[in-house]
Amino acid sequence: MARVYNFCSGPAMLPLEVLEEAGREMVDFNKTGMSIIESSHRGKAYDAIHNEAISNLRELLGLGDDYSILFIQGGASLQFAMIPMNLLGPGATADYINSGYWAGKALKEAKLIGKTAVAADCGKEIPTRVPRLAELKLTDGAAYVHITSNETISGAQWKEFPKTSAPLIADMSSDILSRPFNATDFAMIYAGAQKNLGPSGVAVVAIRKDLAGRAPAGIPTMLKYSTHIEENSLYNTPPCFSVYIITLVTRWLKKQGLENVCRTNREKAAKVYAAIDATGFYRGTALPEFRSDMNVTFRLPTEELEEKFVKESTKAGLNGLKGHRSVGGLRASIYNAFPMEGVDALVGFMKDFESRNG
Amino acid sequence: MARVYNFCSGPAMLPLEVLEEAGREMVDFNKTGMSIIESSHRGKAYDAIHNEAISNLRELLGLGDDYSILFIQGGASLQFAMIPMNLLGPGATADYINSGYWAGKALKEAKLIGKTAVAADCGKEIPTRVPRLAELKLTDGAAYVHITSNETISGAQWKEFPKTSAPLIADMSSDILSRPFNATDFAMIYAGAQKNLGPSGVAVVAIRKDLAGRAPAGIPTMLKYSTHIEENSLYNTPPCFSVYIITLVTRWLKKQGLENVCRTNREKAAKVYAAIDATGFYRGTALPEFRSDMNVTFRLPTEELEEKFVKESTKAGLNGLKGHRSVGGLRASIYNAFPMEGVDALVGFMKDFESRNG
């Protein structure tokens, strides 16, 4: 069996050893005589998996007991609504920093719920980028400040995070646990799992417990952070399989150490950017200082060549390099589990393609 | 490897052949060179799985194109809120039929959103039961009528469904596709997957398309049925693994035929009820005419004996027979995939236990 190199933006490649373990124990988990997906979410076997996922995430993020780690279904997209429903009371204003497609989606949902202000906006600039800290115009007494740590479509990433007096909330779906950072600077971090943490079907939410108390009365039980905090994400049946894979992936991350994971990620990204910058044939779409280590976006001289690049790279076992339909171009998503050999294969292909078409 | 007989109320036993197939192709799905949980939800491989799950469910439910089949995260518990958010406009009244714990949960969420009426209430009766059709006091011009087709905790099940002029909505989490029924009598059917359809992490929703148009403006995008209808449940990344297993389970159901599945389910339940009724030692908790074919609930002469029964049955490889913490007693959940041999093992154990303790 030949594994293809999958450059898709998510769901994305997972560590091979995680998949092999999940395959081996699909029928009989840990000698329980049943699959983890058949196990009661109130039983011992699943309980251990659930709580290990939480403690691994807590350790990797460096968060204490003043934060809850939650598993909530609906992905980051449901969080876009839950955040303002819980945290944006009447009369208050939430600051949103618009850095592109995903930040814009979060803002759009908040506008349905309450009052928002755009503290910086470079969502439509080309080359793509995220705001500089000096550009932020924050609202005094804002309910919270929302950022998107990495924009998967534009390929721009925050390299330094703002320090805000209002609670700082970040959508880290596409770069969570790809690099060390000070998580306690944030009141809340959330991430759809399907890029760096596991399969789709769950968002990981790390939330400072005091924040959850702000929710107005009357919002549905499943949409209140306090429900999930009080019930340790077991108010209703959790997405057990997704949590199980998160446990395996966080074990894998702990074994390597976040510093090493980060070093490898930077090395992988640097190789692709070097190939882009080597001649004038390829052109990176993000401003160099904000280039994402997770999603490398670039263009070719013509759209015809881009189409040819996608077609030929797919044949060469390099899958999913087509850029998002809203912007075109090429994109190589190289999350934590994406192997160095796949990057080398891409770089080799890029050189070869250029020599044939440049 | 010895498979245990898992009588838990859900997540529950799945067909062994489904688990084996999922295990075999966990690393390499269908020769794509990647796992289904690594596959893009916008790619060909997942697309085929997603649409097969929909068409299998449509065929098994006997629904035409006037209904959409949706996959929505958050389980039945999120549906409890989405239903009134979308369908219970200001000034309107929704009829809820209270048959027990789960019907009560649905009602509680609706009360947070709008005006409700209880069209029948036998939620606290003992022996447990669901209402008789003649007891229903329906509201003229109700926005909808909500029922819970099977109460997993009390072990009571609707044997005949009401015909209502208002749109009829059913939570079928614990008995969907366990028996043939006329699905077109319902405007909406929903079910958390983790009992009869697959793993946790997704609710299957079958909704008449015209109903979804009723949603008021301003509700969050992810919580609107119209979003999921328009995007074929691909507005955001769906819970791909759960949908994949639903595809495999519905293939298995189609292979057997719903009539045969139903006949086997009735035979399994009848065997356990016969063991209960054989002497005065065991006592069924549901009124005989409403006894559930999915969750067989019963008591022993004393709580001490019930505790002993749970302990000894677990040792004998019969897992999860303890009743719900809110009601005590014993419960044998025997969904579609629960094997006949497990029922025979339970009946054998019951006779033996009685002979030793009766």
Image (cartoon, coloured by chain):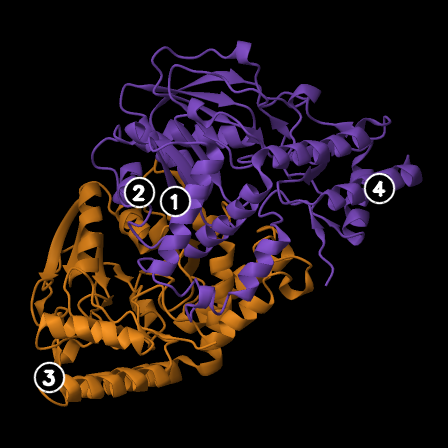
Chain colours: A purple, B orange
Q: Are discs 3 and 1 located on one and the same chain?
A: no
Q: In whole angstroms, how far apart are the C-alphas of marks 2 and 1?
A: 8 Å
Looking at the rendering, which quadrant does residue B163 occupy?
bottom left
Q: Residue at x 27, y 62 (%)?
A: B170
> Is tag 1's residue or tag 4's residue first in the polypeptide sequence?
1
Looking at the rendering, which quadrant does residue A221 occupy?
top left
- Mark 2 vs 1: CB contact within 8 A: yes
Q: Which mark is residue B281?
A: 3
Q: In whole angstroms, how far apart are the C-alphas of marks 4 and 3?
A: 76 Å
Q: Residue A234 in the image: x percent, y percent?
A: 31, 50
Residue B355 located left or right of residue B25? left
Q: Is residue A12 visible?
A: yes
> Alpha-carbon neighbours of circle 2 within 10 Å: few (<14), some, or many (≥20)?
many
Q: Residue B190 in the image: x percent, y percent?
A: 33, 60
> Is tag 2's residue or tag 1's residue first in the polypeptide sequence?
1
- Three-letter code, disc 3: Phe
- Where disc 4 sits, the SS reads helix
Q: In whole angstroms, how far apart are the C-alphas of marks 3 and 1?
A: 44 Å
Q: Are discs 3 and 2 located on one and the same chain?
A: no
Residue B253 located left or right of residue B300? right
User: Looking at the image, how many numbered discs can be counted on the residues?
Assistant: 4
